[in-house]
Image (cartoon, rainbow, N blue to C red):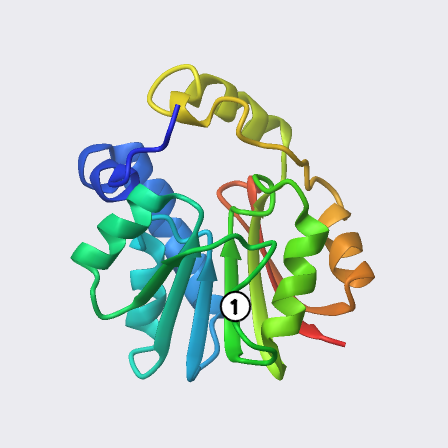
């Protein structure tokens, strides 16, 4: 079942739980953002709902977003025309080496077939002094319980969508293997989400 192109925009407007969840999500990510960033890439941006929040925090930045969902990208281009959106995979980024100051990958790695390849592409496209911000579920007992019930109802579009589990130190181990150094980490949503800020080694 495809995720509707306006899934996040409408969910935040109409569902109190989604509003609270994503408001906290915005706050955590914004607390990790650098003070400035000339070029920013949001991987797995869907229709740009969260990309727009990053842009608000970095108003001088040039903002790019990629996603594999063609309908979502078409919608993003229509309602958020000031950003650069395009259909692309995180496993093969259509950008030159060292072209971004900041790359975000928010609740995306658990959905992709090859997280290692995504991180390799991020490393290639990130400037030497650039920052990477990742957000992944911790797969805690509470998260798994809530996720189970969520995907049986309002969130049924996400059934079987998680291909990888990043509980414990798995995200740290993956980042270390791809030669990233963790600079800061924040748990949120009662320990259900983990945000990590990292730099290239």
Horizontal arrangement in the rendering, residue 83 relative to residue 126 (left or right): left
Point out residue 115 in the picture as x, y percentages from the top left corner.
67, 49
Secondary element type, mark 1:
strand
> Which residue ends up furthest to the top in the rendered image?
152
Examine the rendering and report whether any part of residue 68 can be seen.
yes
Horizontal arrangement in the rendering, residue 55 relative to residue 144 (left or right): left
Point out residue 170 in the picture as x, y percentages from the top left corner.
76, 46
Residue drawn at point x = 36 percent, y = 66 percent: 54
Q: Is residue 38 above or below residue 88?
A: below
Q: Quadrant of residue 66?
A: bottom left
Horizontal arrangement in the rendering, residue 107 relative to residue 7 (left or right): right
Q: Is residue 94 above or below residue 168?
A: below
Examine the rendering and report whether any part of residue 198 can be seen.
no
Residue drawn at point x = 31 percent, y = 84 percent: 60
Residue drawn at point x = 67 percent, y = 74 percent: 199
Horizontal arrangement in the rendering, residue 159 relative to residue 72 (left or right): right
Point out residue 14 in the picture as x, y percentages from the top left corner.
18, 34
Q: Nearer the viewer, residue 44 or 68?
A: 68
Q: Which residue is mark 1?
A: 103
Quadrant of the drawing holding the C terminus? bottom right
Q: Quadrant of residue 167?
A: top right
Q: Count the labels in the image.
A: 1
| Mark 1 Cα-neighbour bin, 10 Å: few <14, some 14–19, many ≥20 | many
Quadrant of the drawing holding the N terminus? top left
Q: Nearer the viewer, residue 72 or 22?
A: 72
Q: Nearer the viewer, residue 54 or 113?
A: 113
Point out residue 124 in the picture as x, y percentages from the top left corner.
65, 72
């Amino acid at each position: 079942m495809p995720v509707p192109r306006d899934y996040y925009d409408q969910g935040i407007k109409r569902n109190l739980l989604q509003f609270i969840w994503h408001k906290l999500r915005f706050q955590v990510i914004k607390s990790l953002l650098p003070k400035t960033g000339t070029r920013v890439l949001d991987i797995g941006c869907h229709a740009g709902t969260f990309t727009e929040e990053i842009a608000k925090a970095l108003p001088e930045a040039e903002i790019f977003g990629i996603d594999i969902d063609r309908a979502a990208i078409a919608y993003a281009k229509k309602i958020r025309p000031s950003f650069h959106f395009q259909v692309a995979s995180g496993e093969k980024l259509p950008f030159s080496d060292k072209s971004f100051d900041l790359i975000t990958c928010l609740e995306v790695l658990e959905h992709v077939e090859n997280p290692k390849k995504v991180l390799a592409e991020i490393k290639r496209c990130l400037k030497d002094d650039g920052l990477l911000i990742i957000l992944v579920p911790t797969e805690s007992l509470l998260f798994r319980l809530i996720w189970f019930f969520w995907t049986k109802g309002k969130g049924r579009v996400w059934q079987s969508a998680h291909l990888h589990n990043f509980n414990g130190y798995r995200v740290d181990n993956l980042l270390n293997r791809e030669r990233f150094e963790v600079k800061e980490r924040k748990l949120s949503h009662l320990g259900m989400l983990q945000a990590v800020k990292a730099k290239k080694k």
